Amino acid sequence: MTSPKSERLTDELRFPKPRNSAGRDVPVAIGVGLGLGALVIIALIVGPLAWYILLAAAGGLAQWEVGERLRESDWQLPRPVMIVGGQAMIWSSWPWGTHGAGTALLSTFLVLLVTRLFLHGTVEGARNWLRDVGVGVFQLLWIPFLMSLAAMLIRMDTPGGVAAPWVIITFMLCVVANDVGGYIAGVFFGKHPMAPVVSPKKSWEGFAGSIILGVAVGVASVIFLLDGPWWFGVALGVTLCVAATMGDIVESQFKRDLGIKDMSTLLPGHGGLMDRLDGMLPAAGMTWALISLLGL
């Protein structure tokens, strides 16, 4: 028979109960996440062309998904222009890098200006032209331009001669660490909301967990996978955690403006494709920027 004192000691040693719910079917979400991870690994093994095909397909689906949600809320964009222009941005980055992606972005922007102006013909005047063009430019920068930077990672020359797939794996590990650290810390210790008006479940404790695990994974990955200095791992971990978190918050505000919870039901346990890419895309862009500026 245990004494009251030993029972109290046992209660104190128990793992803290979660303060918050996850809000998702975690086992299903993990299974889908593993499946997506397998697609990425296969594409990296096959080579640069497979990587570009995977990202071009994801970019097209993400633009279609966002376009559908905008259309349901009476935002009017010429979808063929948006999707074809987005594909042009991604594929132009293969031979011409940022110059190709930038040229395709400018060309798509100019075509968008004219096609949205005459979306209803030349007799009926354009309504909400400035509003729709503005969200169209946002979509082009948000999805295909950042996707172009992610695609270019596979063909990027690194000062240390590190194989490009290891760079991509490193950035993805940091983003996964951001999600896992934020999830664990937020569920068990989340007390102070980070942006309650935009994303009520995101807390400062969760963000701290993201930074801690993200930096730890960043340092370990840079040292053991990229043969780089530890300080670059710290810079990469912090930068990608901040970028991924801001990407998540931006997408939350986007959905809040449209009055929706998820972009779609394409990925069980996650929602839509953009619900999975919201943090990955800005993190990929910042990975490209850091390596371009600082090297390895």
Image (cartoon, rainbow, N blue to C red):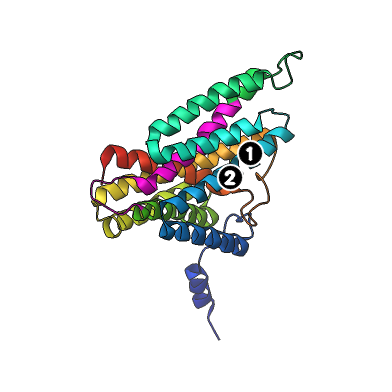
Quarter location, residue 255:
top right
Residue 131 visible in the shown view: no
SS type, badge 2? helix
Labels 1 and 2: the sequence-earlier one: 1
x, y percent for residue 38:
50, 62
Q: Would you call the spot at circle 2 few (<14 residues within 10 Å), some (14-19), or many (20 or more)?
A: many
1 and 2 marks in contact (CB < 8 Å): yes
The residue where tag 2 is placed is: 274
In front of the other: 27 or 185: 27
Give the amino acid type for the residue marked by disc 1 in the picture.
Val
Is 249 colored magenta in this rendering? no
The secondary structure that most of the magenta stretch takes on is helix
Residue 166 visible in the shown view: yes
x, y percent for residue 46:
43, 59
Q: Residue furthest right?
A: 124
Q: Residue shown at 50%/75% (left/top)?
A: 5
Horizontal side of 53 relative to 216 (left or right) equals right
The residue where tag 1 is placed is: 66
x, y percent for residue 175:
44, 51
The span from disc 1 to disc 2 (Cα, nearest Å) is: 8 Å
Horizontal side of 5 relative to 67 (left or right) equals left
Where, quadrant-wise, is the N terminus in this rendering?
bottom right
SS type, badge 1? helix
User: What span is in magenta?
Assistant: 135-164
Q: Residue shown at 70%/16% (left/top)?
A: 126
Above-or-below relation of 208 to 286: below
Give the amino acid type for the residue marked by disc 2 in the picture.
Met
Is 142 colored magenta in this rendering? yes
Q: Would you call the spot at circle 1 few (<14 residues within 10 Å), some (14-19), or many (20 or more)?
A: some
Above-or-below relation of 134 to 28: above
x, y percent for residue 65:
65, 42
